[in-house]
């Protein structure tokens, strides 16, 4: 079957129509005319893959990575970088309209300073029997053996080469978490001479401590812009930093508000957040290690001027949104890595009396369909 790709949908798939069916096509570019094969059908929607590019769209380029299409790490390398940014803006708009009935004329996506070799954190999968190290193949749990990754920062590429030079002799090892900072590389578990060492990183004049066991954003080059836009000129008496992690937003919030409470469920991350705050001599912050749902059930905070939340891909739990509404802050900043769950939660916040002030995307994940979105809301 031959189809024309109309646009790129949330999830990164190309949209086509044929024979009364809606077809989602993997690894497509807008404007492509392609021959496809059907992989599966779900209701009136068919999922397909490309067998031949009959006429490439104007936005299609040759993917530079030899593993593209097999490796599950990237799914936008077939598009120009300008097209990637445009598609991500449309993905955000689509999710906000379809899920929350929020209509925006456009969403600007701030480009990454480094579209390639930007990834400063990674999880490498390990197959002991095949002696393969890399990433999962697309749509499977098979390990794609990767010798060179086009999106890794040079320090992690060198680390990958060193580990591949002496693969671990451990059949129980399934994956390695690696991250780079100002002091080198941290790996968990440590192999090949690498340790789960503590690292530091300077962002917007703040110094953060972390290691491979604590989440830290993958694209360090874009963080200055992200933090600046998220915090803008907010000041006041009290701020709440939910899903605060290792304190990316907690430290600058502490310089703007008289009192800050940070809540995070990962004890490794909160340990590093406290360490960074201590190093910065910021004593007006209480970092709590607790699940967000548990904290909201037991919290005694009464008055909050500003709430920042940066939840995982699943978005915020219902009790968290309910708790934010009960606190009645004057402003909210929602930082999201998934436009669909963001739209779901924004619908609840708007229903609770808040209005959207500004929406902006940040290309935290070039060469993939993923995008970071920052939304500012004010009490209505």
Image: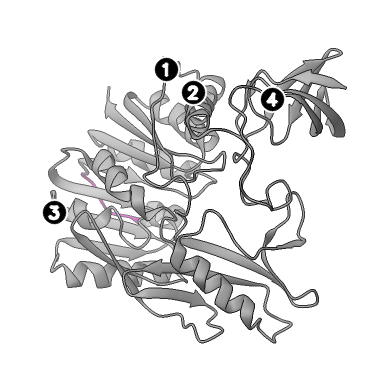
Q: Which residues are magenta?
A: 299-303
Residue 266 visible to the viewer: no
* Residue, disc 2: 93
Q: Nearer the viewer, mark 3 or mark 2?
A: 2
Q: Position of residue 37 (x, y in %)?
A: 87, 32
Q: Are marks 2 and 1 in contact (CB under 8 Å)?
A: yes
Along the line of sight, the residue nearer the viewer: 368 or 57: 57
Label 1 SS:
loop
Relative to 178, does residue 321 appear above or below in the rendering? above
Along the line of sight, the residue nearer the viewer: 194 or 21: 194
Sequence-wise, the earlier of marks 2 and 1 is 2
Find the distance from the CA under tag 2 to the CA under tag 1.
6 Å
Find the distance from the CA under tag 4 to the CA under tag 3.
51 Å
The 10 Å Cα crowd at callout 1, few under 14, some 14 to 19, many 20 or more, is: few
Magenta segment's dominant SS is loop
Label 4 SS:
loop
The 10 Å Cα crowd at callout 3, few under 14, some 14 to 19, many 20 or more, is: some
* Residue, disc 3: 255
* Residue, disc 1: 104
Q: Is residue 217 magenta?
A: no
* Residue, disc 4: 56
């Amino acid at each position: 079957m031959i189809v024309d790709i109309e646009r790129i949908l949330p999830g990164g798939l190309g949209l086509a129509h044929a024979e009364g069916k809606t077809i989602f096509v993997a690894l497509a570019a807008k404007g492509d005319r392609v021959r496809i094969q059907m992989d599966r059908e779900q209701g009136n929607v068919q999922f397909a893959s490309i067998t031949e590019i009959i006429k490439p769209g104007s936005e299609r380029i040759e993917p530079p990575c030899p593993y593209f299409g097999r490796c599950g790490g990237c799914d936008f390398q077939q598009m120009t970088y300008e097209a990637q940014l445009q598609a991500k803006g449309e993905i955000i708009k689509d999710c906000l309209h379809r899920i929350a009935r929020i209509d925006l004329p456009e969403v600007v996506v701030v480009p990454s300073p480094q579209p390639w070799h930007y990834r400063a954190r990674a999880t490498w999968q390990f197959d002991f029997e095949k002696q393969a190290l890399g990433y999962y193949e697309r749509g499977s749990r098979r390990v794609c053996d990767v010798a060179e990754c086009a999106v890794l920062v040079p320090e992690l590429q060198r680390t990958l080469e060193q580990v591949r030079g002496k693969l671990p002799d451990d059949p129980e090892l399934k994956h390695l978490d690696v991250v780079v900072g100002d002091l080198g590389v941290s790996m968990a578990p440590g192999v090949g001479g690498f340790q789960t060492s503590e690292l530091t990183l300077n962002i917007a004049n703040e110094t953060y401590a972390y290691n491979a066991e604590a989440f830290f954003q993958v694209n360090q080059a874009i963080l200055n812009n992200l933090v600046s836009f998220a915090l803008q000129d907010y000041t006041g008496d009290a701020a709440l930093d939910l899903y605060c992690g290792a304190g990316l937003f907690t430290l600058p919030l502490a310089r703007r508000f008289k009192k800050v409470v940070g809540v995070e469920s990962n004890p490794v991350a909160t340990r590093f957040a406290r360490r960074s705050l201590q190093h910065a001599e910021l004593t007006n912050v209480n970092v709590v290690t607790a699940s967000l749902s548990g904290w909201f059930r037991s919290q005694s905070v009464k008055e909050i001027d500003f709430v920042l939340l940066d939840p995982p891909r699943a978005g915020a739990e219902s009790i968290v949104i309910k708790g934010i509404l009960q606190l009645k802050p004057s402003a909210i900043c929602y930082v999201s890595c998934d436009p669909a769950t963001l739209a779901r939660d924004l619908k609840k916040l708007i229903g609770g009396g808040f209005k959207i002030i500004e929406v902006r995307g940040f290309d935290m994940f070039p060469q993939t369909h993923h995008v970071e979105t920052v939304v500012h809301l004010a009490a209505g």
